[in-house]
Amino acid sequence: MSDAAATRTARSRWLLLAPALAVLIFAASGPLLIVLVYSFLTPGDYGGILWEFSTDAWFNVVFEQDFFTEEVTLADAHLSIFWRSIKLSLLTAFLTFVFGFPTAYFIATRPKDKRDIWMLLIIIPFWTNLLIRTFAIMELIRAEGAINSVLLALGIIDEPIQMLFTEFAILLGMAYVYLPLMVLPIYASLERFDFTLVEAGYDLYASRWRVLRKVIFPLAKPGVIAGSILVFVPSLGAYVTPRVLGGGKQLMLGNLIELQFGAGRNWPLGAALSLTLLAIVMVALILYVRAAGNEEVRHG
Amino acid sequence: MAKGFDIRRQTGFATIAMACFVILYLPIVLLVVYSFNAGTSVAIWEGFSWRWYVSAWDNDQVQAATVRSLVIAFWATLIATTCAVLAALATTRQGSFRGYTLIFAMINQPLMVPEIVTAVALLIFFAMIKVATGYTGLFYLIIAHSAFCLPFAYMPIRARLQGMDLSLEHAAMDLYGTPWRVFRRVTLPQLWPGILAGAMLAFVISLDDVVITEFVKSAGQDTLPTYMLGQLRRVVTPEVNAISTALLAISVVMVMGFFFLSRTKK
Amino acid sequence: MIEIANVSKIFTGRGAPFTALDDVSVTIRENEFFTLLGPSGCGKTTLLRVIAGFIDPTHGAVKLEGQDLVKLPPYRRPVNTVFQSYALFPHMTVAQNIAFGLEMLDKPSAEIKATVDQMLELVRMTPMADRKTSEISGGQQQRVALARALAPRPKVLLLDEPLSALDFKLRKDMQLELKRLQSETGITFVFVTHDQEEALTMSDRIAVMNAGDIRQIGGPRDIYDHPAERFVADFIGDTNFLEVELLATEGETARIRLPSGVETEVRAPRDGVAPGPVTLAVRPEHASLSGGDGAALPGTLANVVYFGTDTHFHVDLDGGARFVLRQQNQPGTAQGWSVGDAVTVTLAPGVGQVLRD
């Protein structure tokens, strides 16, 4: 390409990109860098920050120092929240897999013209308001909600089970709202699945279970990995679901971060916690890209 | 007739799938049903009534939040879709270039970075600007929504452009069409379904957002979802169900529209 | 008419730079059916797109009637392209597609309508004028693409493998149709193909390309009978390559000694080759087993393959080389040879071409 033409193309390209970049730098990427700066500053007395360099915020992510004895210990409160976040996110991924895989398989084995309609049934909840879906779960499991009412009416229980504001409630809510994220990628990998491979499996004396385990599942693995990451990542950063269903008692990372900007008034700590969350998410994403890449090499 | 051996069948899968569909829809159906409850409870059915829709409609706060939600969603959709169309043209029509990976990562940042982190970042950054300029209007919410709606608008538009035969534009150029006329007469007419699909997604995403709005909004700038979030702390009346049902209806219509648009032949 | 002078195109992407065109020079004459022939990746389509303006050459000039095209964007060049995929606008009817170029040139609507009607008639698509392009067959789409490109009456029509998507029979029909359109309109056609038969049947002149360069330019007969080098001989038709010794050249005649020791006269390459060991190319149908005049090569019949219209004889020449010759089958007569027979391959006088490499 001649120099003049190359310059022309480059100029028009950046002109076309300019509005998007302006919006993104102003309201996405740029602010993220400021968070990094804030995590190295000193908290102000009434929220906000003082422009003094400090690594206390990062220190306080996992440690705490006794005010009087200056003894350094692990920050149990923070660590238990980290642990709860990771535990609940992993469980959510597992739960959605247990329900999502058979569902995706079921849809992928429907006649071609019906699959889209089944998928629409998965997609609609996915695109409806997360808060509303969380609220729907809340109504279902509250003390006077549908589940307890039915169980009481049937005489199985004598008094309502306390489900709301427990870890179980958060797990249930997250599995419910993120289930479509598991079904979508598994379906995508199963949809293109060549079922003559299954025939070959049966032909070679494999049972149904073994065909599933040895033929179908390995080939659907990229979809399962993608689905697990897609569920794990937003679960880890969940804010609305634990706030509504955990009722401020069962905090997750998202709520801990919010606390620093509200009652805690420790903006630098909030910034450091945010970046810690981001780092965990990025590690998960990198692991995913690696796994997906390996799969491609193996099957490509 | 003997039933043949169905190679696709896996024991129990159909049952689990059906259970899944029931689980997905049962809570939503109950929520909708109770929005028509004549009583004040969201648990005990006392007969059919429109009263909660009427009370939501008459609620000044709900009215204001609805208008605010729609205004923000409208502007965010417009900005995000315009930016997305231009960006999609730049990233699909002129080959790969240095910096493409970075641009792609930037556009998709809202999809990868946890919402709470973005929310905190915007809270910090906009707080600085609010202090510096004294301006506390809706602009912050609109620009924040535009940013996180951008990837949702960008994806279907880019997919449409990539599926579009580049030789069509070459043919138009070959037949003496200037770049602007080629865009208007050939590219745009075929891009419309993609643009519309992108805009619908952006609109739904903006309308549904809770976390970022909750952190960015100034006092008295509740949108419908943040208003609802506030209500959930108190004793919940079916009024929240009514608002939810209305929002659900909008989302479902938009998603169905998107679904059928993206199914139209290219 | 079109002068392409020292055009190079080097693609620099993420990998190593790729030279798609390597210092190509060629002049295409007025009112000519000119074909760029070569295997995929030889640079023929790149050259076509350089003329059309979709690719800027790295070096070199492209001139049309003396005017430099390189500086002009595609929409200012008086050339039109028939695309391999046809690139018909799916949101427009057949007539709207044909009218597009004229509209872009801001012609008066009366003129546009007249030209469109005329073009529809030219390609016999008048009844289909208001159909959507998705509602017509592949062959019809092909004709619409032609009409659309011809409608603005370009000085040059560029055709990028336009027949490759058609089935065999339709392709034969369209070959004749294209030839007819070219002579009726008097427009210069530059035709890109990888199909040697297509090139031989339609072209006035053919440029054989390989690895970004034009290897030989000439009329179809010239190229077929007298390939200049091994690549051309090998790419077009079937060829036997014999290692022979060049004794002397005189003008276009070369005196050689065959492996059997017999001396004979064949065509010499134009740019001259020094005496010594060279390669001789002989077409399978230019030799016979029946004897007659000419140089003889003794050997053993190794295989006989029946092809319907003709029969191929595989002969292991004394000295090791394999020679394939082709004889047309005559009604009623069986071939008189069987595998293992000692036979003599006779080259007709004057056939055979010494290659320059």
Image: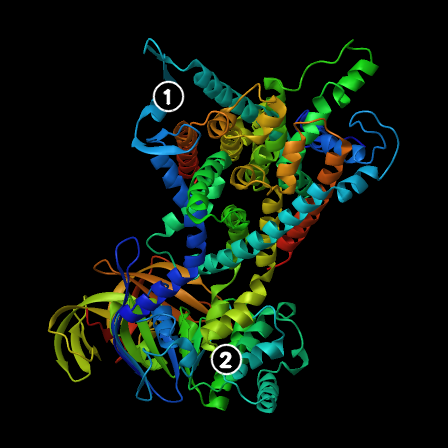
Quickly name the residue at label 2. Answer: C149
| Residue positioned 56% across, 52% down in the render | B76
Residue A60, numbered label: 1
Which of the pair A90/B137 is nearer the observer? B137
Q: Nearer the viewer, residue C24 or A24?
A: A24
Q: Nearer the viewer, residue A209 or C302?
A: A209
Indicate the quadrant containing the C terminus of chain C: top left, top right, bottom left or bottom right: bottom left
Q: Answer above or below: position of A140 versus C194.
A: above
**Could you say where residue C298 lies in the image, as x and y percent from the top left?**
25, 65
Q: Residue at x 45, y 46 (%)?
A: A27
Q: Quadrant of residue C321?
A: bottom left
Visible residue check, residue B63: yes
**To which quarter of the image does residue A59 belong?**
top left
Query: Badge 2 sits on which subunit?
Result: C
For the residues bearing labels 2 and 1, Cβ distance under 8 angstroms: no
The vertical placement of A40 against B133, above or below, is: above
Q: Callout 2, which amino acid?
A: Ala
Q: Secondary structure at mark 2?
A: helix
Amino acid type, label 1:
Asn
Marks 2, 1: nearer the viewer: 1
Residue C269: image x %, image y %? 20, 77
